[in-house]
Image (cartoon, rainbow, N blue to C red):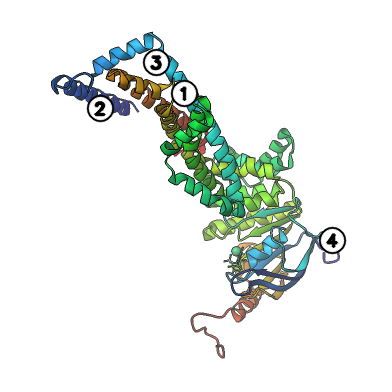
Amino acid sequence: MAEAAPVLVVRQLSTVFPDRDGGLQALEEVSFAVYPEQFVCVLGPSGCGKTTLLRVLAGLLRPTRGEVLFEGQPLRGPQRQVGLVFQKANLMPWRTVLENILLPLEVQGLPRPAALAKAQAMLDLVGLQGFAQSLPRDLSGGMAQRVAIARSLVHDPELLLLDEPFGSLDALTRERMGGELLRIWQAHRKTVVMVTHSISEALLLADRVLVLSPRPGRLCLDLSVDLPRPRLEEVRYTPGFAALSLRLRQAITLETPHPLPPPLKGRG
Amino acid sequence: MKANFLLISSSLLLALLGWHLLATLGGLPAFMLPGPLQVAERFGRALQDGTLLRHTLVTLAEVLLGLAAGVGAATVLGYLLARSLPLERLLSPYIIASQAIPVVAIAPLLMIWFKTGLLAKVLICALIVFFPVLVNTVVGVRSVPDDLRDLMRSLQATRWQTLRLLEAPAALPVFLGGLRIGATLSVIGAVVGEFVAADAGLGFLINVGRGLYDTALVFVAVFTLVTLALLLYGLVALLERYLLAWQRKP
Ligand SMILES: Nc1ncnc2c1ncn2[C@@H]1O[C@H](COP(=O)(O)OP(=O)(O)OP(=O)(O)O)[C@@H](O)[C@H]1O
Ligand SMILES: [Mg+2]
């Protein structure tokens, strides 16, 4: 897979937010590449710049230094081949479920009948057939997030960017949604970059896990996850999973200064 | 719904009865406080000879034109202010200062500048409607969630698409709140203008009634004004019901 041309190339990316004392550095010298059909998870402590990284990849935020290549071209702004899922479902409360999924096609100016057929197919894909005419306020958190995923896929993007998409869901729903995302990814062969703060979620889903250090976020580990697929729940209890899990945990805790005395020696 | 109606109509009847008793047993002359029956009779006469309709139509025209002008200007300016910080910094001192001047005080000025015709009243009406609609437009457009703005940007929506698909529907609840206030104020605006100088309209009719000690006619005009304001308010409420159906509790 690594021989194919990368979908995304990130080179020496730094992002500084201007503030009163000289600027707040969110990302520092981050470099990596993402290859077609890869599922990459980005892991890191809160506030390390994961959302910032994703906003840069989505073309919503210009990096202060460094560059991003999307399919070989320097990224200058948002791309239509990119689908975006936010931490909260981020639906329009005045639109029905179906109309929310239709939004990207409406913006692209696709004729209504074709758009409706596509949106309907997405609704089926995320298992919400009966809810086309429901309003977002009548959905559970998991259902709303499914609508958001359907909306991000409806215009058939090549790259899917997800920012802690299941962060606000309970553990069981979260696991099920992860499974559904995996099924969609396998059926449609998209390239996925997903931010998460759950080690086990990253290991269950990803081909590769990138770990960011606390702010300023630097890339401190790029770990290949070679666990066989399909990864069922039981994979959690295998030695391979445990070993990877430990490596990730160490990468995160070694980089995270604990407010409480940590059970590690020789740290100040 | 039915109980509600019953409650309202019985309280209305009670108020009318109280008024009637006060007028007949209070010992006040009719030019001080006419009873409801006298007012009803005067209403019938004013309706028959066409005065009421003629003056109501004049006021209604002023109100509707004033509303349209005020709401139009406030919506456009409010949107621009909400989207441009420099513009807001530049204009907001003037806008706030303008609110410190009572409309009644500048009404005579407008009369001098624009003569006593329809235009002056429409302007006063528009002025009074302008501010609440402006403020609510700014607040409404500012309340559009950043994440939804990001979504529209990531979809490469045009300025116009963002306005039509995101900003307008998102700002609508707050905007309609402003319109509701503006609609009732607009009637006040028209009457203020008619008080200062006019030869037609319900405000003019009140002045005439006062001059002739025809107090029942004053009552008729006031009630018509109240009805007009209530109708406008109801119209906006109806609009809200229709446009904001997605907000209603099931
Ligand atoms: N628009 C902005 N202006 C100024 N500072 C910002 C902006 N966006 C983010 N930051 C700062 O940059 C840092 C990284 O923020 P970011 O949201 O990327 O973190 P994160 O890793 O996504 O955190 P979390 O896990 O809590 O979502 C934070 O300190 C944040 O306060
Ligand atoms: Mg974040």
Q: In what quadrant does ligand 2 lie?
A: bottom right
Which residue is the extreme one toward the top?
B48
In which quadrant is the N terminus of chain A drawn?
A: bottom right
Instruction: Residue type at mark 1: give it.
Output: Leu
Q: Are marks 4 and 3 on the same chain?
A: no
In the rendering, which numbered label is found on residue B52? 3
Task: Report whether mark 1 lies on the same chain as mark 2.
Answer: yes
- For label 1, the SS is helix
- Chain of the residue on which disc 2 is drawn: B
Residue at left 78%, top 59%?
A75
For residue B101, above or below residue A222: above
CB of mark 3 near ligand 1 (< 8 Å):
no
The image quarter in which residue B79 lies = top right
Q: Which mark is residue A72?
A: 4
The reply to whether discs 2 and 3 touch (Cβ–Cβ < 8 Å) is no
Q: Residues within 10 Å of mark 3 (few under 14, many from 20)?
A: many
Q: Is residue A160 above or below residue B177?
A: below
- Figure quadrant of the C terminus of chain A: bottom right
Point out the tag, 2 or 3, that comes first from the N-terminus: 2
Question: Which SS class for mark 4?
Answer: loop
Kindly report the distance in space between the C-alpha atoms of the residues bearing marks 4 and 3: 76 Å
Three-letter code for the amino acid on which mark 4 is drawn: Gly
Q: CA distance from mark 4 to mark 2?
A: 76 Å
Q: CA distance from mark 1 to mark 2?
A: 29 Å
x, y percent for residue A202: 64, 66
Question: Pointer 4: residues within 10 angstroms few (<14), some, or many (20+)?
Answer: few
